[in-house]
Image (cartoon, helix red, strand yellow):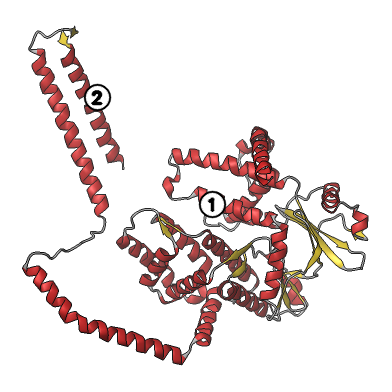
Amino acid sequence: MKDKESSTTAADNKTRQPGRMQEIFAVLKRHNIIHGVTPEKLRSILEDLGPTYIKIGQVMSMRSDMLPQSYCDELMKLRADVKPMPTEEVIRTIENEFSKPIKALFTAFEDTPLGSASIAQVHKATLENGKKVVVKVQRTRIYETMAQDIIMMRKAVRLLNAMKVADGVIDFNSIIDELWSTSQQEMDFFQEASNLNEFADLNSMVPYVSCPSVISDMITSKVLVMEYVDGIPIDHIEKLSSLGYDMNKIGLNLAENYVKQILDDGFFHADPHPGNIWVNDGKIIWLDLGMVGKLTKYDRELFKKIVRAMVSHDIFELKSVLLTMGETTERINHARLYTDIDDMLTKYGEMNLSNLNLGKLLVEMQTLAREHHIVMPSGVGMLGRGIVTIEGVLSACSPDVNFIQVASNHLKKSLLADFNLAKELQHTGKSTYALIKKSIDIPAQLSDILKMTIKGQTKVNLELSGEDETLKDIRRMMDKLVVSIISAALIVGSSLICTTDMTPKVAGIPLIGFLGFLGAALLGIWLVAGILQSKRH
């Protein structure tokens, strides 16, 4: 049944693609894109293009290294200030999902949404028992629209790859894959309900953290009902300060909890922008857990090593973690990788730890890995963006709180908590015994090597850094030399044939000689073109 539905959806998407393309062109035309794009116009265009492009705008809002700050500030509004659905459409979706009229479900339902985002919007309502709730309603036909957009994006990427745009520096396919994967996660309201329950369980012992509870019998694929939690967004600094809140303490608690989510739980909020972090009665309320990141215990250990390596400027350790965590697609130039990591850490090493931006450093590390043909897990990108976002929140709300300092202190505490003297002594004893045992074998091994050397049986394997590039250059030179020799041979041979009366003839030249001259001319043109092209590079 599922196969039949998926094939129907695929066929449906194919028939709608031309219509979607016309819709996109109509939006661009309506906004007069040929007359320039202001920050406000860009936000409006992305809003009108729909959820896929809104998600792209949300990601780009964090990339001030790629866009001017004025554009980033405007795109920030796409996080929780998206054009809402009409109330009639919202009510129709709720009634279709629960097969009941809206009045049979809620005694009160507010038409004006509390918030409207790319995937869904939320409305305040009241249950029959008087409990205040929020109703999260998915946008109409969002899955089909985003699926069409992703298909068109993949086609565009194939065209860009064929034209060698960005020349592999930007992995567009992995970006699209992650965009689609996270969007599908956000569109699964059953998964979001599960995320809320798991988050509440993991943070049940943290007195200053909470999240909305789920109304378990009011969940469908497109509607999710949760308890209503009052609060103030964390970036409303003046209002929080006027109520007596210590913003420095709130920021410290926020950073400590997010570090715990990453390093201890391996289950972290992947979209921690200010609209998803509220403060109420001294507690930090985490909202919208539709998109979460998950790290295995092994991944968490590797991330801890990354933080330690960055703090201690350990190039060897960071290089080792990169190669362990990622998957290499081509042969690695280890010397150049070491140098690039050294340059990156040197640039940040001159900064004080309090000024170090861990999120930006992680994003830069991922870019470096990509340049060296190391494919990092998709979760690393999500983690990097999450940390970039949380550091932005801290910078605006609690500038004195430094995320990497909190992470470093957390690591020190966990190391002390995990330290076991008896186990350490046992491990050291085993290592010492193994070392002594191997040392006994060294004289015998040296004796074997000397005997093999005397008999001429010793072999030495060397790996020269950059040898691949050198060999490629030599091959190119040899290819050009061979072409030159063949061209010269064709000219000489054709000239000799011209001294004979061989028939048939073309323009008074024997046909075979004519073809020889033609071949020599073509090879010569190809050779000259290759030389000119290599000079440009």
Real-space Cα separation, disc 2 to disc 1, in angstroms = 43 Å
Which quadrant would residue 308 be assigned to in this image?
bottom left
The kind of residue on which mark 1 rests is Ile
Residue at 44 percent across and 46 percent down: it is: 166
Left or right of 164: which side holds 408?
right
Relative to 271, is 81 on the left or the right?
Answer: right
| Along the viewing direction, whichever of 330 and 58 lies nearer the viewer | 330
Horizontally, is 469 left or right of 10 in the view? left
| In this view, 419 is above or below 537 | below
| Location of residue 486 in the rendering, given as x and y in whole percent from the top left corner | 16, 29
Q: Number of labelled discs?
A: 2
- Alpha-carbon neighbours of circle 1 within 10 Å: few (<14), some, or many (≥20)? some
- Determine which quarter of the picture holds residue 190: bottom right
User: Nearest the camera: 325 or 48?
Assistant: 325
Question: Looking at the image, which residue is at 27% across and 40% down?
Answer: 535
Residue at image location 14% in from the left, 22% down from the top: 491
Q: In the rendered view, does 166 fall on the left or right side of 102?
A: left
Relative height, residue 227 to residue 371 (above, below): below
Q: Amino acid at mark 2?
A: Leu
Residue 324 shows in this picture? yes
Q: Position of residue 193 (x, y in %)?
A: 73, 63
The first of marks 2 and 1 along the sequence is 1
**SS of the residue at dot 2?**
helix
Q: Which residue is mark 2?
A: 522
**Can residue 41 be seen here?**
no
Residue 504: give x, y in percent of width and height: 17, 7
Q: Which mark is residue 175?
A: 1
Q: Residues within 10 Å of mark 2 (few under 14, many from 20)?
A: few
Image quarter where the C terminus lies is top left
Of residues 199 and 18, the one drawn nearer to the viewer in this rendering:
199
Classify residue 218 by image quadrant: bottom right
Q: Secondary structure at mark 1?
A: helix
